[in-house]
Image: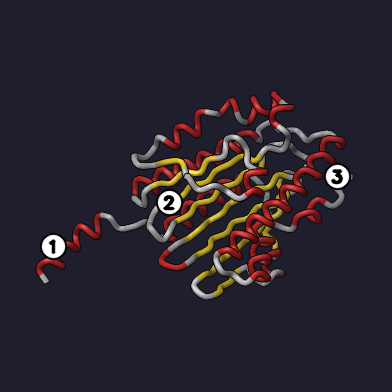
Amino acid sequence: AVQRSALAPAARLIQMVSADDVAAVQAECLSKIEASFKLSERDFADTLDCASWSAGEQSGDIKGWAGEPKLGWVTSAVMRGSAGACTTELSAWVAPSYDLPHLLQQIELLASGELVLKLDYIARYDLPSDPQYLQEYYLSIAGWRDEVIGSVEGAALSSAQPDLFTRCISSPMQLSLVLPGTDEALAAVKTACVAHVERWVGHWEGAAEVNRMKRGGLFSRDTKMHRMRFQSHADSLAATGLEAALAERVAQALVGPGDEQYVGQAS
């Protein structure tokens, strides 16, 4: 009994980050988007019967908003697994009337207690063929990635390879970082995620709509990337043991309504 008592304080000192802690980070980032854009919550996930879903030890809550004319779709999702594991996803998919990068954030709390932070600004054009776009949205902010990597002792780039579809749509600035499950690391994740959103929101200052020809090209590219995101999510969810039909419904809710959200804008 004496030994158990002596060990208890040490256990409290290394208490792991919780799923609620991770969800709170995403909620703060979502509030930054809500404060900057006029969003209208939609029942898309409800129509797929997975706004709030559960299967065995897994469960999730998914919400979506339209934000036209600037944002085609915004998704906020929290998905929980066994042993306290949790994944949050926040994405803001820009409408084809504008050519700013899409925003993507994911935070994973692994059953081991480690955190995985994934951030990206998904490019809307082929970067080598558009040096001006590359400079404006990537080279001009190249330092942020190294800052995040160096923000916590013990943080390291993830050695896990993303699937083919994710690799296809990711930008060269995509970050996937593994961090210890400590309060210090959680604070660094929060700082990085908030800065990631605020930097993206800042790009909207003075943003102008693109011409009709570019709009059509953006619509076509976005549609293809949307389908790749869907397949990536469907495959990864099925790999966790979810029944295929549910995995596909959840994947569709995560990426949003897709082609139909742009009807009338690309013509």
Q: Decide which of tag 1 and tag 2 comes sooner along the chain.
A: 1
Pinpoint residue 146: horizontal percent, then vertical percent: 46, 32
- In the displayed structure, does residue 179 sit left or right of residue 117? left
Pinpoint residue 218: horizontal percent, then vertical percent: 78, 40
Which label sits in the foreground, 1 or 3? 1
Q: Quadrant of residue 45?
A: bottom right
Name, please, the residue furthest toward the left: 2
| Image position of 191 with respect to 143: above or below | below
At x 62% / y 68%, what residue is drawn? 51
- In the displayed structure, does residue 147 sit left or right of residue 73? left
In the rendered structure, which amino acid carries the disc numbered 1?
Ala
Provide the residue designation for mark 3. Answer: 266
Q: Say few, some or many: other residues with alpha carbon within 10 Å of mark 3 (under 14 / 14 to 19 / 20 or more).
A: some
Q: Say few, some or many: other residues with alpha carbon within 10 Å of mark 1 (under 14 / 14 to 19 / 20 or more).
A: few
At x 55% / y 65%, what residue is drawn? 240
- In the displayed structure, does residue 52 sit left or right of residue 72? left
Residue toward you, 5 or 238: 238
Assign the N terminus to one quadrant of the image.
bottom left
Mark 2 residue element: strand
Provide the residue designation for mark 1. Answer: 6
Disc 3/disc 2 C-alpha distance (Å): 40 Å
Provide the residue designation for mark 2. Answer: 115
Mark 1 residue element: helix
Pinpoint residue 26: horizontal percent, then vertical percent: 51, 52
